[in-house]
Image (tube, rainbow, N blue to C red):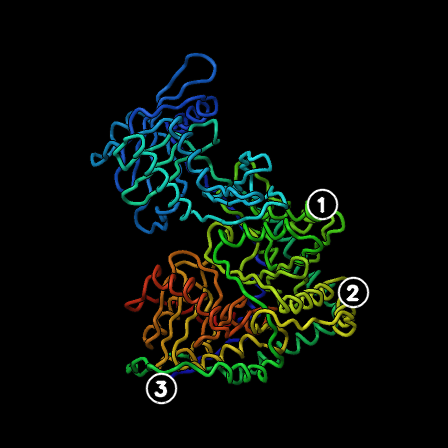
Amino acid sequence: MDFKRTLPFPFMRVIHYSILFWLIFCIDLFLPIAALSEDTNTVAQMWINQTAEIEVKEAYVNDNQIYIKFQAFLKDGNFEKDFYCQSTWGGEGSEIDLTKNIIIPLQFIDEAAWQRRPADLKSMTSLSSEHWRNFRLKLIEKLTPKEKQKGVVIRRDEDELLLYYDENQKLQIIDLKDKPSHIEISKSLSQVELAQEIQHVLSEYLKNQEISDGQVVLTIGSEEHDTNLFLYVDLSKNITVGLKIDSEPNKYRQGLIGKSIKSADHLVLNGLVFGVMTRPVSTAYRLFSWARDTTYEAVHPGPFTLFESSVIPPLVDTPGMDLEAFERKLDALVGHQVSSGTIDFLIGGDEFFPRLIDAVSQAQQSILMRIFIFDNDDYAVEIADLLKRKSNEGNMEVKVLLDGMGQIMGEGKMPEDLPSGFIPPASMSEYLRKDSKINVHVRSNAFFKADHTKTIIMDEKICFTGGMNIGREYRYNWHDLMMELRGAVVEEIVKEFKIAWAHSSSWGDLAYFEEIMGRSKPLHKQEEGYPIRLLFTRVDDPQIYKAQIAAIREAKRYIYVHNSYLSDNTILYELIRARRRGVDVRVILPVNGNHEIMNASNVVTANIMFRNGIKVYFYPGMSHIKAAIYDGWLCAGSANFDKLSFKDNLELNIATSHAPTVKHLEEILFEGDFTKSLLMTKTLEAGWKQRLAEFLAEQL
């Protein structure tokens, strides 16, 4: 067996970090629109805004298109007009899951385009807005809990609604962000679950109406919804699709000059001037540690993991590692004992954010938030507004600790599907402070080191931690994981928050040393729950890295890894060694991540793992999950599998070998994602761009 060694280029890390002084050139390209098409959309928009009733005249559908002809009646006068529209979905590279209750834009067309519609379209049944109102009432009655002070959250595209009956048994439907504190969320329905409920209730409704057609389009109308006109349902294929008026996407971009000044202001002034002035000891120590590690890497390059032997041993059928012995080994390796508590897993924005909003509204004394990115998009502003309202309640304490580098990343780009007219705040730290009692600290980034930790603590009793930041993509688009912790482990995390909060203050090192030396409140050693270990990445203390390398080396039966950023050579080397001793090693990567350099690097990494017998899965879409299970030992949190997370940034992972908890995550996350992901069956094409990206990613 032979393998090569790569020659690391430590100065590339300096070059990479210096790129954070980038100049962002934002050019909006406006393509010419035919006058006829522009007139059609403009006239249609005007009529829809003034319409009282809509009546579908004809509707046709095939596997990926729907064509609708409808008549609109103006509110004032006996005026009516025919309109034609179509919607297309699917096609090559589509990531649309039509089993969900999703929203697809309608495009208005002229009569000539209507006449040229595809020949394979089939006619389908259309139901009036009266049918919609009757059906909607039955659906709401089925979904809404009958118990007092209980509610259900439903998500339809980006609308989050809370349904409940008030003290007078009157149905209330409100935005989730306006949830009364006395209402408890009994269930939160994802888009898939809501689509299933729609299909079930509609099937019964059609049967009662003696309608046999399984493909129907319901007219929602324009009075109830500003843009959603129709709902298309195919009961035979379990498809539920909302159709809305297409609108021009929000093209907001922050200006070049303002962005550059803001980046320089934080990274240079706050990070390298004021940050060093207030934190001279810790900054000097960090610089020394970084220089020492970089020099060591230059002299002692790590192994490159391309094994030349083509013989891949079969999987072994043996018991896993001795978890009790491994926990004792970790006690010595990371230097502290385990804590205790419980873990509830929240997968995706549908599970996490309704639970977060509920917990925020229920908080009585304090909310302590430590977050890497607090975006300035519309959803992040909604969460900010909730925190601001909460801070103004009595003696409520709300503290928000942001990372300066993370804020530059979060505030530097905007999604193109923002609501029309939305103007993002230029600074979320200032927005959080305005008209509120929120205390905000923004941590400076001396030598480009970030606080990548995500913890949100309510009343020092409940803590959410994991991979999610605050923003639209985490709520609606990305696959991610958060954990809800209770018990003594929360007290440990509160202690860590207070240390980080003190260190980020204007008193810097003085406040930091005072906090760790003069803590007066002892931790309560509660025994509720089961053993939970906190693992950190700190300056000169890479606990997460050391623990997971040890776990890979100890594993005897299986290793499951779910991470988008896998560029550390030592980890890759150890994973291949584990597979070559018969361990079942499986790795899930995203089909398309959020960083192009890492996407290209993952191609090379996937090929290396595939050639060495590791099962590589590609998750359909963007996954931001950072979780791994080694023979029943779980490690999940904020840390990626790269140098930034293992050695440079501040990170927090949660670990446990509690069998029911680990088995539960294995079932709800890994087994499900193995099924829905694409298993790699051949090597991918990798040219010089991918190899260059992989070389650069090794330095990150």
The amino acid on which the numbered mark 3 sits, given as a three-letter code, is: Asp
Which of labels 3 and 2 is toward the front?
2
Mark 3–mark 1 distance (CA, rounded to whole Å): 61 Å
Q: Which residue is identified by label 1? A: 434
- The secondary structure type at the circle numbered 2 is loop
The amino acid on which the numbered mark 1 sits, given as a three-letter code, is: Lys
Q: Which residue is identified by label 3? A: 2
Q: Which residue is identified by label 2? A: 507
Front residue of 601/485: it is: 485
Kindly indicate the quadrant of the structure image that contains residue 19. bottom right
Is disc 2 surrounded by few (<14), some (14 to 19) or many (20+) residues within 10 Å? few
For the point 61% across and 77% down, the residue is 541
Q: Is residue 429 visible?
A: yes
Residues at badges 3 and 1 in contact (C-beta under 8 Å)? no
Considering every residue shown, the one lying at the far bottom of the view is 1
Which of labels 3 and 1 is toward the front?
1
Question: What x and y, as percent, mark residue 480?
Answer: 48, 59
